[in-house]
Image: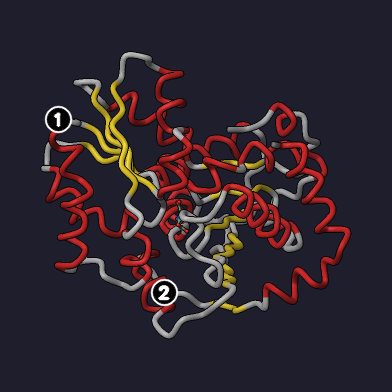
Amino acid sequence: MISHNNSSKNNNLIQNNAAIGVFDSGIGGLTVVKHLRDLLPHEDIVYFGDTARLPYGIKSEEVVKRFAFEDSHFLLEHGVKIIVVACNTVGSTAIHLLEEHLNIPVIGVMQPGADACVKKTRNKKVGVIGTATTIRSGKYSQKIHELDSKIKVIDQACPLFVPLVEEGFFEDEATHFIAKRYLDKLIANNIDTLILGCTHYPVIKNIIQRIVGEDVVMVDSGEETAKFVEKYLASNNLGTSKSTKSELKLYVSDLSHKFQEIAEHFLHNSLSHIETIDFEQFLIEKGQDFRDYINQILIKDV
Ligand code: DGL
């Protein structure tokens, strides 16, 4: 998850009191922010949710990779000290490129989720749910099998979950009905542990738990990532020296009428700073050089 390149990055250049940058395709990553704020109450956070271009989970890998660089560079312009990629879809397609090409540490959500599920399973039957792109990538199975090749992984794409969640259908019959259709296969395979492999899913965790049964252990990859970030900042001497209450700045590329209500549900808290940015304008201002830089990276990656 942390590239070799990252570990050699010059920490002296990184301002300890700079914010942690977090991005996702939408507001799903706020489930990660919630845990980061619980564990690291003095760390400032700059969040970017690319709500105008959501969902990422049904787009091609190339498009997701391009978006990942654009979103990361938006955060870099805010002077963040690390970037948390709070999106499994980006984690499954582009994180290796971000780790290689950004000059600050990049932390994804998949490895902490995989580590936790390997520790938690008793019968070695693990379910993974995520977006179509995340499941198609097979990255969770790969990471789990690197840790324990005997674990049987049963995965299932749940493409309708993201729109249901963004619509605010948290405790809704429609969500229950669709979740049942998706989860039946996992139940039939007798899983005892389930990775919520999309940062949008923790807000419908109760519905999922009721369907799969109380005995199935849920792994929230966002929660595991926040624990990882806490350890990473401490062991790399990157923690803030501030003792004041932290600030959360939330930027989105589109602000729907229900946004604030839904975002506050994700965060279990109220929001003070939300700003809509014209992302197309941001990209125009970055110019042709920036487009060429991304194109070069993508050409070499195929
Ligand atoms: N929340 C994102 C994830 O973890 C993806 C949602 C989407 O844009 O499809 O995969």
Does the beta carbon at disc 1 come under 8 Å from ligand 1? no
The chosen color scheme is: secondary structure
Image height of 250 relative to 140, above or below: below
Residue 270's tag is 2
Q: Is residue 214 left or right of residue 65?
A: left
- Taking the spot 49% from the left edge, 42% from the top edge, the residue there is 109
- Taking the spot 38% from the left edge, 57% from the top edge, the residue there is 200
- Taking the spot 27% from the left edge, 30% from the top edge, the residue there is 126
Asked which secondary structure carries label 2, the reply is loop
Q: Residues within 10 Å of mark 1 (few under 14, many from 20)?
A: some
Image height of 169 relative to 80, above or below: below
Residue 87, position in %: x, y?
50, 51
Q: Quadrant of residue 217?
A: top left
Residue 284, position in %: x, y?
80, 72
Going by the numbered disc 1, the residue's amino acid type is Asn
Nearest to viewer (mark 1 / mark 2): 1
Q: State which quarter of the image contains the N terminus.
A: top right
Q: Earlier in the sequence, mark 1 or mark 2?
A: 1
Q: Is residue 69 left or right of residue 274?
A: right
Q: State which quarter of the image contains the C terminus.
A: top right
- Taking the spot 70% from the left edge, 48% from the top edge, the residue there is 16
Residue 7, position in %: x, y?
71, 30
Going by the numbered disc 2, the residue's amino acid type is Ser
Q: Is residue 275 left or right of residue 88?
A: right
Asked which secondary structure carries label 1, the reply is loop
Q: Nearer the viewer, residue 228 or 243?
A: 228
Residue 190's tag is 1
Q: Residues within 10 Å of mark 2 (few under 14, many from 20)?
A: few
